[in-house]
Amino acid sequence: AALIYGGWTDFDLELTESQGRMWTNDVGMLPFEPQDVSGYDLDNVWTLDRVSAAHEFMYRPLTQAATKWFNKDQFTSLSTMKTALKDYRVRGSTELYSLAVRTCDVDLFVDQEGGVKHMINATHLFDTSISDHKNAWRRFKIWRDTIEPAINNV
């Protein structure tokens, strides 16, 4: 339930009360309603269906909401991007940006196979000798591709 209500409030989701109850029910517990007086049965606390529902919630409503916070106009120049993403700058760095700073401590991020997918390097992103970095739309798409891994890394 905390996963659902935490995401609902942190990402300002426009969910109805009914949708909130549906999502919390899908992950196995309505808020403030324990399963029974004997506590939780560990065999059904996080079943595959409940883990799948939790990931679906993070992918669908959370990722879609976070994607709407950004647009290609924020990636027209390095200074424009740094201003637009100032709240997402990784602590202790002047060049690294990640949505993960909003969701958790970047130092706690679980490494994924295939390299770092949840953050960008601003200087590298504006290296126009790289064909994928030549215009604002392409740079925005690279940033957009970091959103889902930053949210789903639990």
Image (tube, rainbow, N blue to C red):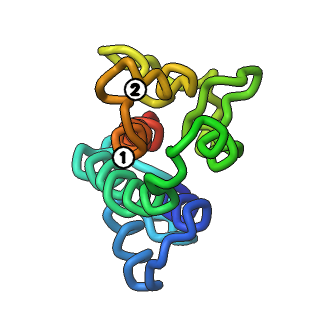
Q: Is residue 5 left or right of residue 26?
A: right
On residue 117, which mark appears?
Answer: 2
Question: Nearest the camera: 77 or 84?
Answer: 77
Quadrant housing residue 32: bottom right
Count the labels in the image. Answer: 2
Question: Nearest the camera: 1 or 44?
Answer: 1
* Mark 2 residue type: Lys
Which mark is nearer the camera, 2 or 1?
1
Q: Residue at x 41, y 66 (%)?
A: 24
Question: Nearest the camera: 32 or 41?
Answer: 32
Q: Residue at x 37, y 32 (%)?
A: 134
As displayed, is residue 23 above or below residue 104?
below
Q: Residues under labels 2 and 1: Cα distance?
A: 18 Å
Sequence-wise first label, 2 or 1: 2
Quadrant housing residue 56: bottom left
List x then y, in percent, for residue 140.
41, 44
List x then y, in percent, for residue 27.
36, 58
Judge whether residue 42 can be spotted in this image: no
Q: Is residue 124 left or right of residue 88?
A: left
As displayed, is residue 47 above or below residue 27?
above
List x then y, in percent, for residue 6.
58, 59
* Mark 1 residue type: Trp
Packing grade of label 1 (10 A; few <14, some 14-19, many >=20) is: some
Q: Residue at x 63, y 21 (%)?
A: 107
Q: Which residue is mark 1?
A: 137
As displayed, is residue 37 above or below residue 154?
below
Judge whether residue 18 can be spotted in this image: yes
